[in-house]
Image (cartoon, helix red, strand yellow):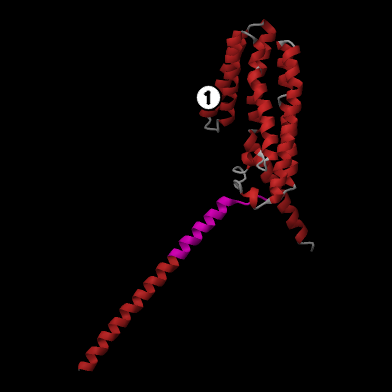
Amino acid sequence: MTSLDKPTEETEADDARAVTEAALFEAFGGVRGMVETVLPGLLFVTIFTLNNDLHMSAIAALAVSLALVVVRLVMKDTVKHAFSGVFGVAFGVVFAMMTDNAKNFYLPGMLYTLGLAMAYIVTSLAGVPLIGLILGPVFKENLSWRTRNPGRKKAYTKASYAWGLILLAKSAILFPLYWWADTEQLGWILVILKIPPFLLAVWLTWVFLAKAPAPIDVFAEMEAAEKAEEEKAERDKAEREAREGEAVESAADSTRGGRHRKD
């Protein structure tokens, strides 16, 4: 490798890492997405700790979730993270209200976390790691990594196992607390455990993908194929028109030649 090759390779590696960071930021919502995830639960447990009022706590959590969606709509941002937060809070409110048990505000989210952990692990065992299904469209590679990019498939599998094991560990902490701890203890520990496991999983995903081969941009391939087809069609049309022109000229020449012979 020459002295000129090394900076180029380092630049390409830096570009790949930057693309990976941007894709992860987009897929998981970044700092704003984390705030939207934490804020409703934090508000619920804070109000419940202060006045032990289930209805006020639940209404406040749901109201702030809806407000976050409205803010995104007004700013014309993507609302998928905020909407997912609204649905999670709404299920929690329904569970808590129906059972008149504030602990059940957290139960849907805990069950979702456990189910998601199992999904990460099962899909990895099946050879279709969930994190690849999530990030494939973000990287514009769709499912090309399954058959055409084994290095990325391996990275996605490792990342999915990491997500699954981290979420399983989180569930192993929370479910015993659901049975043994009071509502305030469970709520505060849930708030504390919202961000660190998530950041650890995202960081491990970044580590695995940063070392993986670059994604295959299937959208660029499709555009190139369409462009090639259009160019081929234009060439065929030009050749056809040229042949038709030659045929017309030949016919005209034959006509002129016949007239000369008559003369």
**Residue at coordinates 50% horizontally, 61% vertically from top-left?**
228
Assess whether residue 215 is covered by the magenta stretch.
yes
Across and down, in percent, residue 169 comes to 76, 27
Position of the C terminus, as image quadrant, is bottom left
Secondary structure at badge 1 equals helix
Q: Residues within 10 Å of mark 1 (few under 14, many from 20)?
A: some
* Image quadrant in which you'd find residue 64: top right
Q: Residue furthest left?
A: 263
Between 31 and 135, the residue placed more toward the observer is 135
Viewed as shown, does residue 146 lie left or right of 6? left
Residues drawn in magenta: 213-233
Assess whether residue 94 is covered by the magenta stretch.
no
Residue 119 visible from this viewpoint: yes
Q: Which residue is mark 1?
A: 70
Across and down, in percent, residue 217 comes to 60, 51
**Residue at coordinates 62% horizontally, 40% vertically from top-left?**
133
* Image quadrant in which you'd find residue 99: top right
Query: Height in image: 46 above or below 28?
Result: above
Per the picture, the main secondary structure of the magenta-coloured stretch is: helix
Across and down, in percent, residue 186 comes to 72, 15
Residue 64 visible from this viewpoint: no
